[in-house]
Amino acid sequence: VTDLGFHGDAELAPGLADLAVNVREGAPPAWLRDVLRESLAGVAAYPDVRGAQAAVAARHGRPAAEALLTAGAAEAFTLVARGVPGERAAVVHPQFTEPEAALAAAGRPVRRVVLGEPFTLDGHLDSDLVTDDADLVVVGNPTNPTSVLHPAAALRALARPGRVLVVDEAFMDAVPGEPESLAGARDVPGLLVVRSLTKTWGLAGLRVGYLLGDPALLARLRAVQPPWAVSTPAAAAAIACSAPAAVAEAAAWARAVAGERDALLAAIAAHAPGVAAVPAPRAPFVLLRLPPGVDGATARAALREAGWAVRRGDTFPGLGPAWLRVAVRSPDTSAAFARDLGSVLSLKEYAS
Ligand SMILES: Cc1ncc(COP(=O)(O)O)c(C=O)c1O
């Protein structure tokens, strides 16, 4: 049984290098910590998130009424599951498991649409995969754990009158220039875009994200959101991270990550040549497949022995134990990891 509630943080333990959680190292930056510290002066009052909603909307060229602040992207999935009416939800896998978990928790049946390798929506075949009667479709872009960036046109092709299309863009700010983003698309019927500020900005413990879309749809979600779900410091962070200088900082980091990801893939090719990576990764992590005959659980245990926590792949629908997700870190860290991965795979228990 797939454990939809398993997340990368469960892989961590003292002394292990973290390649399992995709929160940016070194974040939040000092200027953002200052913003959070200053916001504490206002925490005696109940939060007023209107300014933050206007700020995140403006960052994507939308009026304030087209944004809803949430306690992380995770809360957005719960609001969708409770607030969007319908009976035939389809979830495109492999992807982050919380959207399906939230639908299940709300008692809603889910049809899994499982993409095969290379895990990319290509536009014309997809309408066969997602049947016309689906009234809610959830897809990630770029996708966790595959790191695939779907073409915006393929996502647009999934929209229909009478259907809500949820695109989880939690990692889009880690893609240089945000190509294929629908965050600013106001012409797609039933579109809801989910964004997160927790990964790039190191705010996983603060819980801050938002939804973008049609005001009438957002009103349904607001109606099922607990009062004051987003705190005053989280709202302050949303304003600060939407400023042009912050958006430019995230873009610069995204460009740096692209180089570091190339270094990670080159190191794996050099030191662990039997390991295959899903092609064209665009997120700050890569999805690896161990060579045939290698037991994933044994390999993960050996990597832990060597000091590395990686994210198991087998809890994602559509993947199995041979898959591992690995965060992009500095080239030195990646080289050390790739060398240990190569050593682990050359251990005699894998020799056939
Ligand atoms: C693809 C994806 N969407 C959403 C989330 C949830 O993000 P947040 O921390 O904003 O709730 C995650 C967290 O791992 C994720 O990987």
Image (cartoon, grey):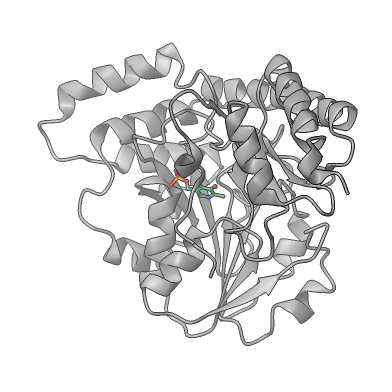
What residue is shown at x 62% (from left), y 65% (from top)?
Answer: 317
What residue is shown at x 76% (from left), y 27% (from top)?
Answer: 338
- Does any portion of residue 181 appear in the rendered image? no
The image position of residue 346, as x and y in percent, is 82, 35
The image position of residue 292, as x and y in percent, is 84, 54
Left or right: 125 in relation to 317: right
The image quadrant of residue 304 is top right
Left or right: 161 in relation to 215: right
- Does any portion of residue 276 appear in the rendered image? yes
Q: Quick one: which residue is furthest to the left in this view?
A: 44
Q: Nearer the viewer, residue 78 or 86?
A: 78
Vertical arrangement, residue 136 with respect to residue 320, above or below: below
What residue is shown at x 50% (from left), y 67% (from top)?
Answer: 100
The image position of residue 314, as x and y in percent, is 62, 57
Q: Nearer the viewer, residue 4 or 248?
A: 4
The image position of residue 349, as x and y in percent, is 77, 44
Left or right: 309 in relation to 49: right
Q: Nearer the viewer, residue 72 or 146?
A: 146
Vertical arrangement, residue 130 with respect to residue 222, above or below: below
Number of numbered discs visible in the structure rendering: 0
Vertical arrangement, residue 314 with respect to residue 130, above or below: above
